[in-house]
Image (tube, coloured by chain):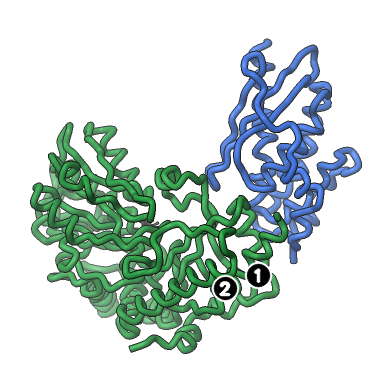
Chain colours: A green, B blue
Amino acid sequence: MALDVETIRKDFPLLARVVNGRPIVYLDSAATSLQPRPVLAAMEQYYETTHANVHRGVYATAEEATQRYESARVAAGRFVGAPDPAREIVFTKNATEAINLVANSWGRANLRRGDVVLLTQMEHHANLVPWLMLSEQLGLELRYLEVDGQGRLDVSALDRKLDGARLVAVSAMSNVLGTINDLRPIADAAHAAGAVVLADGAQAVPHLPVDVRALGVDFLAYSAHKMLGPTGIGALWGRADLLDAMPPFLGGGGMILDVRLDRFLPAESPQRFEAGTPPIAEAVGLGAAVRYLEAVGMEAVRAHERSLTDYALGAIADRLGDDCTVFGPPAGDDRGGVLSLAFRDVHPHDLAQVLDQYGVCVRPGHHCAKPLMRVLGVSATARASVGLYNDERDIDVLIEGLAEAGRLFG
Amino acid sequence: MPDLEDLYREIILDHYRSPRHRGELESPPAHRVEGFNPLCGDEVVVTMVVDGGTLQDIKFAGTGCSISQSSASLMSSAVKGKSLDDVRQLIRTFKSMMSIHEAALGESGPDEALEEAAPVDVRTIGELAALQGVVKFPVRIKCATLSWNALAQGLDELATAAS
Ligand SMILES: Cc1ncc(COP(=O)(O)O)c(C=O)c1O
């Protein structure tokens, strides 16, 4: 079923904004998405009618708050095909914290000096720096799958690079190139080599149907704020047997069974990994975002964004020709809606500034992927990225603004 | 509403398209400083020769947007051959043109900040006044000050080494 973008746009209050005298053209969903009214309403309604601290409370609103928090956990897990969502979803601050949790908890318990961790050149700093930090302490051997000329992972050396690997951590979709990585064969090869697989789902979960069983991975990290939810909450899905065997990450209230002055007993997972008062209203918002996306249907979201990406790639090539380079794979099944642009030799900062005058929100910079920028041979790009609420007019304004930048700096 | 023409004045575009004093002086004898804008990954390298209380020569290199590149070009043109006292005074004037606004930006928007800012006598800074419009675009201030910070750092380092 196709998605009705006109109707969807009405659900997003921020799209009514006017900036610099123009209606806003929001093309920065890879950085963070906008929120539809049902998500905002769910959070407000929670604060107005229910707010109380979760777990431990006996009174009615505390029970309700706990119940809503836990039902958000189930929704977040169901959304990514978790077999047992109530046990397998750990709420975190964001995808970054979810990956840090795996590095610090699973990593410290399972990795030793000289162990191999396989990453890729296209990772976000969130899936690089935690491993670099761990390696500083443990002395790991970090290896990288390379990115080929079309912005895809080069898996030709996969088996060789997996030799001795204990962990593979790879993005399901690049936040710079839009590449949708085919994780299944990588996960299968990794498992055959005895490694555990973590997928960075920060970009994939908001824009594609994601099923952890189909992907064949062991951990999946994602953030609510990129999938129509609020900031301040993310999730780690982990295979139950792995989570059950992992030591705690942060210590504090809510993650223990018993505490004495000389020792403590941690709670079962997922509570074991949720120290302190969690983001309760944000969990409610995430639950509402999941319901919104499920009602639209992730197949429909992907189909819409795919056709918009095809349109954008075609229109940019037609109207701007060789002046504009878009990094990443050509239109196709493995091409997500992230367009990292270079326009002649106009600096991305200047491009973004001119586009701002057209109300167009794009992001200049390295997109927290400095190693990938070096592979691409640029210091920065201007990145336009689509969401389910974008339409072809948005792309047309983007191209109009790029052409103007060309005239100004020509 | 800040306008693009306030930012991209003709002088700025001119210095961006044909930068003056671009390159690197041989170091040593020149003193070399690198500046870094972590926000956008821009880098600037400023090389300078100081002799007898005068900034004898200066060049800049690196990559950056039109604002950082033109600011470096305008700066080099303005300070080359000047006494160190004059150079320091110019750095102060330029930074106050930029940084007073930066400090005032906290709560209020850019427009209010402009009104509150102490006036810089633009007649004393010549072509550099073209960069005034940058303060209306707060995120770009760091682009404009990148090379100036590198120059100031270089002069400080030379002064410390000499004392
Ligand atoms: C691929 C990828 N991984 C991880 C992250 C980190 O997400 P967050 O900042 O929400 O933790 C991002 C977001 O920028 C991303 O695009």
Q: Is label 2 in a helix, a strand or a loop?
A: strand
- Could you tell me residue B46's position as x and y percent? 65, 29
Dot 1 alpha-carbon crowd within 10 angstroms: few under 14, some 14 to 19, many 20 or more: many
Q: Is residue B91 visible?
A: yes
Quarter containing the C terminus of chain A = bottom right
User: Mark 1 — residue?
Assistant: A358
* Quadrant hosting residue A283: bottom left
Given the image, on which type of amino acid does mark 2 rest?
Val
Between B37 and B44, the one lying in front of the other is B44
The residue lying at 54 percent from left, 73 percent from top is A395
- For the residue pair A31 and A74, the one nearer the viewer reads as A31
Image disc number at residue A253: none
The correct choice, above or below, for A403 with respect to A109 in the image is: below
Amino acid beneath label 1: Tyr
Sequence-earlier tag: 2 or 1: 2
Q: Position of residue B93 (x, y in %)?
A: 80, 37
Q: Chain of mark 1?
A: A
Mark 1: which secondary structure? Answer: loop
Q: Quadrant of residue A229?
A: bottom left
Give the residue displayed 49% in from the left and 77% down from the top. A390
Q: In this figure, what is the number of numbered marks? A: 2
